[in-house]
Image (cartoon, grey):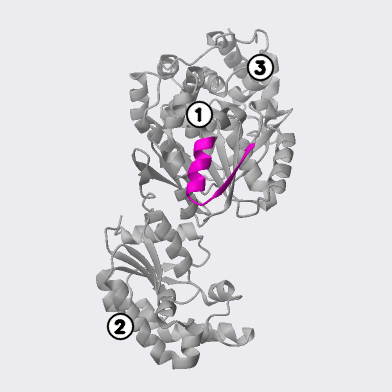
Amino acid sequence: MPGHGNIILTGFMGTGKTTAGKALAARLDRRFQDMDDLIEEGAGLAVPEIFTIHGETRFRDIESQVCRDVAAQSDLVVATGGGALVNRENHRVLAESGTVICLSATPEQILERIRNETHRPLLDLAPDNRLERIRALLAEREERYSSIPLQIDTTDLTVDRIVDRILTLVSGGTEAEVPSPHPAVPGANGSLLGLTVRNPDGSYPIWTGSGALAATGHLLRACGLDGVNVAILTNPDVEALHAAGLVDALREDGFNPRVFTMPEGEQHKTLETVRGLYSDLLAAGMDRRSPVLALGGGVVTDTAGFVAATYLRGVPYVVAPTTLLAMVDSSVGAKCGVDLPEGKNLIGAFKQPVGVLLDPDLLDTLPPAELRAGMAEVAKHAILGNENLFEILMHAPASPAADWLAAAVQVKIDVVEEDPLEQGRRAILNFGHTFAHALEQVSQYKIRHGEAVAMGMTAATHLSVQAGLCSPATAQRIRNLLTGLGLPVRVRDIDAAPDLSGRAGDLLAAMGTDKKRQGAVLRFVVIEDLQQLTVIPNPGDELVLAAWEHVLT
């Protein structure tokens, strides 16, 4: 990451210098300076007025002085005017103060971005002549722009993606390299670890650590959402524990938070609940810049994400999970949705959040049974992609630690980045879930999701062994991991377990509505060894029923 040198963004008008510069400054917690604003402050005139009254030569003289003033400072993010660094001396002065990056875009994209702007003195032409003028000016400046070593073509890039590429270049990489993680930001008890999730639309940060929830305002500002209304969606239990502190923190940061509640429980993750929330948001005046912030467990995050994806055709979405299961599972991946009587999550969408806040302090109020159930997702991620985490969990008490949390989340990040829309490898994240969702449905959700996932992984592993794909030794290691974490591997292991004896046929039928089927063919995630999982079509009712009997007896 950059030190104390300035980061100077230059290039033609409309390439994103100011927009990306503000987002970059917010992400790095630096001051942003727009040189045109500094020129206007010093001259007491708007830029077009300087051109009209004094001419371009006088404007360039003032611009050179501003370059010298900016270069005398440090820790700035600076957006220059489009012609500032055409002057070689200006380029030299600013380059000595930090890193200069030239942004570019196609003439057509530039025209689209500035189409409705009226303060461009060099484009004071009829709209039909603007594209020709842009091409001519680009040709005049091409030699100077191309002489700047660090270049980013911003055509069709989101602001987040531009910022990621800037950070890569400043860190000494090349634009083709994977961007550096989002930087750490201050937390209540030190700094927060910053992870990055990249997706086709850009990227978003996950801030992890004690006090992360109090940094919500900082996160919103980093996303360009200053002083907006914030819709906090939660349930009554979480509201009583955590909403007041979040509301106070947001108000101190200049935001206007409102709390909206939905009933607790999977049975309320429905279109009826969503419809009521739409009405509440409209009545409260929430607009398209008002983020929906999910404060709760998986039911809240699933529902809030779906509301954010569909209310007013989409509003910003922030995730602040309050359960271990939601921190490890719902914080990454952008999947959201609600249930139908026929099955779980049958109505949904992909909604990328603008950011995620994982605050382990919120787990202090979690009942032990819920905390233990959350360890099922941690264990699943260890099985999928981190053998070191697997070994740590085998020899550790069943309670979360910050390094486990980050390691488990990183496994899902790696898989989701490879397959953001679940077209291929991402399906392995459903290990155990085809069985788990049927268990939840047939038990009328009397089995916790984490408990169902643990038994679902047991059933899927048993099926894998019976199909000749997995060794009994690997199956035993997985069983030992789950039981060591206090997780059930059979229904009878659950306190006050529902009576599902003789229900294997019902459970098999319930699997028929699983959303991961292709046509009439149900698909199963099976395991060959740790970190070696694959998806197969339905191996036949006999093997599936045997897997069910294994966890029911």
Please give the name of the residue rendered at 54% of the width and 18% of the height, measured from the top-left corner. 455
Above or below 56: residue 344: above
Q: Earlier in the sequence, mark 2 or mark 3?
A: 2
Quadrant for residue 434, please give it: top right
**In the picture, which quadrant includes the C terminus?**
top right
Q: Nearer the viewer, residue 522 or 135?
A: 135
Above or below 254: residue 413: above
- Residue labelled with disc 2: 88
Question: Tag on residue 50?
Answer: none
Q: Earlier in the sequence, mark 3 or mark 1?
A: 1
Is disc 1 surrounded by few (<14), some (14 to 19) or many (20+) residues within 10 Å? Answer: many
Q: What amino acid is labelled 1 in the image?
A: Leu
Question: Horizontal and vertical percent for residue 383?
Answer: 43, 27
Q: Are marks 2 and 3 in contact (CB under 8 Å)?
A: no
Q: Could you tell me which secondary element the residue under label 2 belongs to?
A: helix
Relative side of 279 to 42, left or right: right
Foreground label between 3 and 1 = 1
Report whether residue 412 is seen.
yes
Q: Could you tell me which secondary element the residue under label 3 belongs to?
A: loop
- Residue labelled with disc 1: 325
Q: Nearer the viewer, residue 111 or 268?
A: 268
Q: What amino acid is labelled 2 in the image?
A: Arg
Residue at the left extreme, as displayed: 96
Question: Horizontal and vertical percent for residue 487?
Answer: 48, 16
Q: Which residues are magenta?
A: 244-260
Report whether residue 330 is seen.
no
Question: Horizontal and vertical percent for residue 306?
Answer: 64, 42
Q: What amino acid is labelled 3 in the image?
A: Ser
Does the segment drawn in magenta span residue 20?
no
Question: Tag on residue 443?
Answer: 3
Please give the name of the residue rendered at 52% of the width and 17% of the height, measured from the top-left corner. 462
Does the segment drawn in magenta span residue 250?
yes
